Image: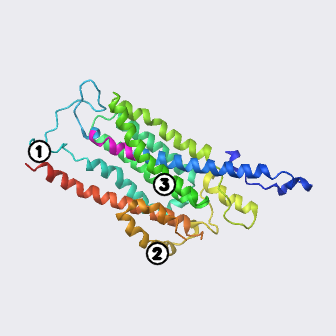
Amino acid sequence: MGGRAGSWRSLSDSEGEETTSDPQPPLLDHQGAHWKNAVGFWLLGLCNNFSYVVMLSAAHDILSHERVPGNQSHVDPGPTPIPLNSSSRFDCNSVSTAAVLLADILPTFGIKLLAPLGLHLLPYSPRVLVSGLCAAGSFILVAFSHSVGTSLCGVVLASISSGLGEVTFLSLTAFYPRAVISWWSSGTGGAGLLGALSYLGLTQAGLSPQHTLLSMLGIPVLLLASYFLLLTSPEPQDPGGEEEAETAARQPLIGTEAPASKPGSSSGLSLQERWTVFKSLLQYIVPLVLVYFAEYFINQGLTSNEHREFAMAAACISDTLGISLSGLLALPLHDFLCRLS
């Protein structure tokens, strides 16, 4: 990862007139870093939400205990589920697919709720690594599961991966130009489309749900590669002192220990300050519960630098709350509709 800091140093370290003789390479380096970060955050948004979307797309298969002839399922054959009402016009399972929705969203909700209080104590690299491992584990666990309970545990892993990744990467945008937020947002939108289409396309092409899920193990690998190999070191946020700025920007990314408190970082905020900042964000969070896709537009309006990292992590709880409420409501609604004659 040593190459990630290559563009930081100015040519002022060189001697004599050679420092200004060829201004083109620094410009090219800056443009190259811009596009690497843009593509990197787009891929991070895509990969981070991919497992979440796939688990929702596979919800019916996850809850089914019936082996489809000619297309092996990822679960052992068992008795055909008895519908709540055989005359119902709805396609019913013994367990509502809302159970998958809740397993896919409640862990994320918990992570987003608690993360702003202490997640900053961990450096970014271990968080990204855990996120990638959880995503891979979710695909493997669901693919080889023989029961609904085990499959739901795999869905929970996908939710942990998505929630931890979203809080981590949104906080990370505080160290990069604001344009990367739009790239991240575009990537998460692409995950909704590509995740659903890939699962549908592969299963319709003849792959079993098991093989389809296993074929997606490249996504967590791509997530880790995008972070560790594609992203460049963030630009210094503090203009005072090149050495201090370099250390401040690199430490959250590649440090093995928690970064020390320093100006411009949320790690030095007290609980009272965090609560004050959180209350000031309610005017954004409440509307986002209803319209969560507005999250990224509103996040860009948050204010200067010591509050920015914390605010990015705190505001992203809104979409998860809205989805969680819909999942809770869907459980009784499913049973009610399936009992209709």
Instruction: Look at the numbered disc 3 and give the secondary structure of its residue.
Output: helix
* Residue 164 x, y percent position in the rendering: 46, 53
Magenta-tinted stretch? 52-60
Check the picture and name the quadrant holding the N terminus: top right
- Mark 2 or mark 3: name the one nearer the start of the chain: 3
Q: Are marks 2 and 3 in contact (CB under 8 Å)?
A: no
Residue underneath mark 1: 88
Closer to the camera: disc 1 or disc 2?
A: 1
Residue underneath mark 2: 280
- Mark 3 or mark 1: name the one nearer the start of the chain: 1
Residue 137's image quarter? top left
One can see residue 122 in this view = no
* Residue 81 x, y percent position in the rendering: 16, 38
Residue underneath mark 3: 185
Which residue appears at 64% of the width and 52% of the height? 34
Q: Is residue 97 above or below residue 65?
A: below
